[in-house]
Image: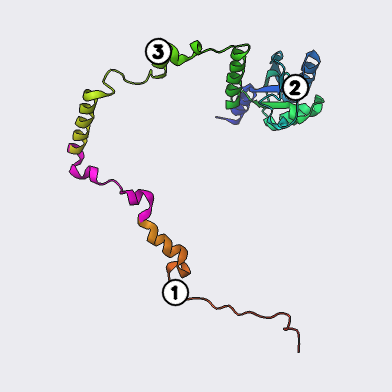
Amino acid sequence: MQFKDFLSESFKKEYGYRVKIAADCGSEQMDALEACLQKYNLVSATPWKRTPIQENPVEFVRMKGVKCTSEVCSSDVILKYPTNPRLLEVWLAVNMGLTHDQVLVYDVKEPRRLEADMAAERVEADLDRSVTEEDAVLAQEDQAHYEAQNADTDQTGSLFGEDYNKKFLDELAKIKKEKGADYFRSYPTKDELMGDNLRSMYDDLVNGSNMARGTETKEVTTINQHSAGKA
């Protein structure tokens, strides 16, 4: 690819970030956000999406230990120029009159976005929810949830009982025939697995002199510095 083509392709790229602010944000804050992002060639910014007021919003870990009751407003922005999310946090905080603890920015492809969306769904689903024993999944006779969790498991054959044991023994016999009778005798012993067979070597290395390579000792001459300058 020629440099001109590479440069042309780079101008076509767009970079998405999610901005979250632990504060009550409205049109004034949106105008300030858009003004701050002009230096990165702002393409678009979605309207504020709000979460209910809560104490110490879970994502804002820098506010840990600080009593903060606030709603969280978020906006997905698209920029032409890439930037470091941490630097963008500081830039937005300074120019929007907020503390750094109140601003959170991360790439839209970052795993934290998926985690945050899942957490928000759980909070919304659990809002004003009263749980009873009848709601427990294990109490339901319908096992569709279990089948969905084990969709990739081959359940055509027996998973226990005489048929399963026979299938297991036949598979062992097949391996023994292919690899030889000594194949199952080459497993490490318990002492080898636990390292007990190396205990004597360890004792020599740790407790022996000169790392078990000899018994010689070194003599050290002590020089009295206080008397060195005296005649």
Q: Find residue 14 and report its horizontal and vertical position in percent.
A: 64, 22
| Rendering coords of residue 71 (x, y %) | 73, 18
Which residue is found at the position 63% from the left and 79% from the top?
A: 222
Circle 2: residue type: Thr
Is 94 contained in the magenta span?
A: no
From the viewer's perspective, is residue 194 above or below residue 66?
below
Which is in the foreground here, disc 1 or disc 2?
2
Q: Residue 38: image x %, image y %? A: 76, 22
Whether residue 110 is visible here, answered yes or no, is no
Horizontal side of residue 150 vs 22, given as left or right: left
**Is 219 left, or right, of 208 in this rendering?**
right
Q: What residue does disc 1 label?
A: 215
Q: Earlier in the sequence, mark 3 or mark 2?
A: 2
> Which stretch did the figure color magenta?
177-196
Amino acid carrying mark 1 in the image: Thr
Going from the N terminus, do you reach mark 1 or mark 3 first? 3
**Where 178 falls versus 12 (above or below)?**
below
Q: Is 8 placed left or right of 90 in the picture?
A: left
- Colour mapping: rainbow
- Which residue position is annotated with label 2? 69
For disc 3, the neighbor class at 10 Å (few under 14, some 14 to 19, many from 20) is few
How busy is the neighbourhood of tag 2: few (under 14 within 10 Å), some, or many (20 plus)?
few
Give yes or no for contact between labels 1 and 3 (Cβ–Cβ under 8 Å).
Answer: no
The residue to which callout 3 is attached is 143
* Residue located farthest toward the front when viewing the structure as drawn: 133
